[in-house]
Image (cartoon, grey):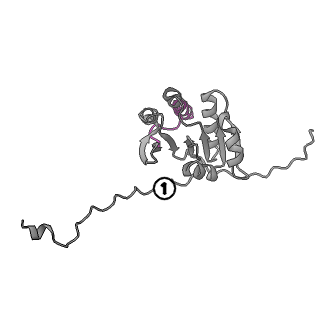
Amino acid sequence: MSIAELTSPTPLTRAAPVSAPPPLRFPSIQPGQIWLVEPSASSGPCRHHAVDGANVVIYDRALSERMTQALPLGTYAEPAPALAAAAAARCVGFARDGWSVVRLFPARLPQRERTARVRSLVDALAASLVPGGLAVRVFAEAEDGICEAAATRLDDLARLVASYPRETRLTVVVDALDAGAAHPHAVAANGLAG
């Protein structure tokens, strides 16, 4: 190569900038589905997406203050029972009745507690005779904001959840249980007993 070629006025080519991966598109929440959501401190798009579309929200008491500010008008919400098994049974009961259910619990739970809560849901679904092959999707958001999606079966869910580090916020979507859509009921009361 000559000096003339080295000093040529042709511009040097640059590598194309690396673009950020496209944001994950969450599925719409369906009747009979159960979503387990670990909201971020900034209340990310998944929590808003799930809560805005849910019929029922069951949340840990630690999230009470945030829930009163974030719930859409008309959404039924209740604090979760203290025992994970009771909270899971409550979620399954609503989903079996055809309601879409979101179960919120704090992010960054110790790994053992997070996995135990998921196992409680799997056990409650199994007790309700839901097949172990039911499709489940897991959306994982790392601390750096990178999201990934994984598909699994209900009977493999606890093992998959245990494989994610504590810092990763998860959203688990259990496919619709075999139930009809919930029918709205009008309720009127005058506040008087009897």
Horizontal and vertical percent for residue 112? 50, 26
Query: Can residue 150 be seen in this snapshot?
Result: yes
Horizontal and vertical percent for residue 114? 52, 31
Horizontal and vertical percent for residue 28? 55, 55
Locate the C terminus by quadrant: top right
Residue at the extreme bottom of the image, as rendered: 9
> How many other residues sit within 10 Å of disc 1, few (<14), some (14-19) or many (≥20)?
few
Q: Is residue 159 left or right of residue 181?
A: left
Can residue 66 be found in the magenta stretch?
no
Name the residue nearer the viewer: 23 or 90.
23
Horizontal and vertical percent for residue 45? 55, 52
Helix, strand or loop at label 1? It is loop
Name the residue nearer the viewer: 33 or 113.
113
Query: Can residue 137 be seen in this snapshot?
Result: no
What is the span of residues highlighted in magenta in the rendered image? 117-136
Can residue 131 be found in the magenta stretch?
yes
Name the residue nearer the viewer: 9 or 16.
9
Mark 1 highlights which residue?
25
Locate the N terminus by quadrant: bottom left
Q: Amino acid at mark 1?
A: Arg
Q: Is residue 113 left or right of residue 62?
A: left
Residue occupying image coordinates x 10% and y 71%: 4
